[in-house]
Image (spheres, rainbow, N blue to C red):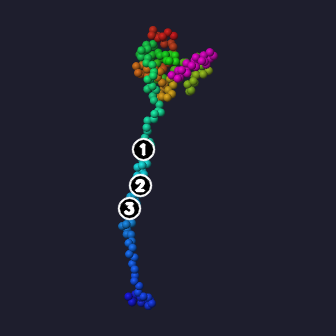
Amino acid sequence: MADYFADDPGQTETPQYTDTTPQPTKKHETGWIVLVAVVSLSLILIGILILTWHTTKSFQTTPSTDAPVPCSSQVSTLPDISSNKCCDNTVNKQFTNPAGLVFIAGPTAQPLSNVCPSYCAPGAVFDSSNNTCSAFPPGTATSSENSFNACVTAMDPAGCTGVAKPIATNNGVPYYAQASTTTCQTQTECPAS
């Protein structure tokens, strides 16, 4: 030891202390990194699964109770005209609805723009874009306007989907206004007008 302090004669020998504190090893550092990575990936996967479930659930459609029903299904309160023989040509039948309008009724839906204009008085103007009748000649306004409005009310598919509402049934089959007429008097079963 004397050689160790040979350069400095005033130096005395002091014991050298070693640090005995455990130092982290590479093995411990790698373990923490792996643990943090596994936890992070797990959280990310859980987040993706939750978002996927929520997104899928929000795009599922549930039947709306406000959705319009087909007009052809709204027949429970309509009169059955199966026993009516007036103008009965095996398909179409004459029918007078509760508002007093006389229709030829059949199983094929017709738009009201094909049927109701005949209730506009001669000389009145039918507007097919708005389904209105106006400019009635003098003396015809009230009765023609009432008849036209009653026809629109009977056929208008408001509240249901379809071309028109049925006006009657024939043995459970929806029947729609085909034409408005009072001239179908070809059989004795037809009421006299």
Mark 2 sits on what residue? 43
Q: Amino acid at mark 3?
A: Val
Whole-angstrom CA distance, mark 3 to mark 1, is 33 Å
* Quarter of the image that includes the N terminus: bottom left
Q: Nearer the viewer, mark 1 or mark 2?
A: 2
Label 3: how many Cα within 10 Å (few below 14, some 14–19, many 20+): few
Q: Amino acid at mark 1?
A: Thr
Label 2: how many Cα within 10 Å (few below 14, some 14–19, many 20+): few
Residues rendered magenta in the picture: 136-154
Label 1: how many Cα within 10 Å (few below 14, some 14–19, many 20+): few
- Indicate the quadrant where residue 106 lies: top left
Mark 3 sits on what residue? 34
Task: Work out whether 68 lies above or below 191.
Answer: below
| Magenta stretch: includes residue 139 | yes
Identified at 45% across, 10% down, the residue is 189
Whole-angstrom CA distance, mark 2 to mark 3, is 14 Å
Task: Work out whether 79 lies above or below 38.
Answer: above
Query: Residue 164, percent across and down?
Result: 49, 25
Near-viewer residue (97 or 94): 97
- State whether residue 71 appears in this view: yes
Near-viewer residue (167 or 11): 11
Near-viewer residue (137 or 19): 19
Q: Which mark is residue 56?
A: 1
Which residue sits furthest right? 138
Judged from the image, the secondary structure of the residue bearing numbered disc 1 is helix
Query: Residue 6, percent across and down?
Result: 42, 90
Which residue sits furthest bottom? 9
Q: Amino acid at mark 2?
A: Leu
Label 2 or label 3, whichever comes before in sequence order? 3
Query: Residue 108, percent across and down?
Result: 45, 22
- State whether residue 117 appears in this view: no
Whole-angstrom CA distance, mark 1 to mark 2, is 20 Å
